[in-house]
Amino acid sequence: MNICLYGSGSREIDKIYTDEAYNLGCIMAQKGHTLVFGGGDTGMMGACAKGVHDNNGKSIGIAPEWINNFEPLCEDCSEFIYVNTIDERKQGFYDNSDAFIISPGGIGTLDEFFEVITLKKLKRQNKPIIIFNIDHFYDKMLEMIDEMGEKGFLYKQNEIYKVACTIDEIFEYLDG
C-alpha cells in the first residue's frame, strides 16, 4: 500500500513527535508499505522517511524544486516527482496514495488535511484518512470539529476519518 504522510518539515519539532514519526516509517517499511510524502528531509516528513530508508523501504517524494528554499529535500527517496506548484504536489499525493496519515504539522499540513477530508466528504476520493494524534496534538482541533458537528455545520465526520493515538492503531485500521 502507498501511504501518504502529511506533516511538518520544521526543524524545531519536539523529539516526542519526530521519534514517533521515525517509528512509523520503520513499521511502514517492515510491513512493505511505500511512503508518499512532500519530499522534505526534516521534521515529521524527514523523520518518517529516515525510518523507511533505515529499514530498506520505499518512498516517493513529491515537491516543486523551489520548496528547497524553505526546507531541504530528501535525497534518499526511491523516486522523486518534481512538480511546478503546490496544487500539482497535492494532486500527486492523491494519484500516488492509497491512504493518508495526518501527523502533527502546521498550516500546510492543515491545508492538506482539510482538502483531503473535503474531497472524501464530496465523494471525490474514498481512501482511508487517519489523524495520528501523537501526544494529544490534535485534541483541540478535534474538539472544534466535534463542536461544528454539534452545531449543525458538519455531519457524520466520524465516517470521514479515524483518529489514532498509536502506530498500532493506525495499522489495525489500515490492515484490518
Image (tube, helix red, strand yellow):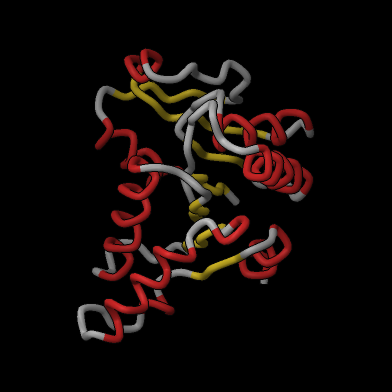
Q: Residue at x 49, y 37 (%)?
A: 37
Task: Return the x and y of residue 119 as percentages of the image width and height.
Answer: 28, 61
Q: Quadrant of the C terminus?
A: bottom right
Q: Residue at x 42, y 78 (%)?
A: 159
Task: Return the x and y of residue 106 as percentages of the image width and height.
Answer: 40, 42
The answer to whether residue 122 is above or below residue 156 is above
Classify residue 18 by image quadrant: top right
The answer to whether residue 127 is above or below residue 50 is below
In the image shown, does 139 or 130 lie closer to the viewer? 139
Task: Return the x and y of residue 151 as percentages of the image width and height.
Answer: 23, 85
Q: Residue at x 79, y 34 (%)?
A: 55
Q: How many marks?
A: 0
Task: Return the x and y of residue 139 as percentages of the image width and height.
Answer: 48, 65
Classify residue 153 by image quadrant: bottom left
Residue 54 is left or right of residue 171, and the answer is right
Q: Residue at x 34, y 72 (%)?
A: 145
Residue 167 is left or right of residue 5, and the answer is right
Residue 122 is left or right of residue 24, and the answer is left
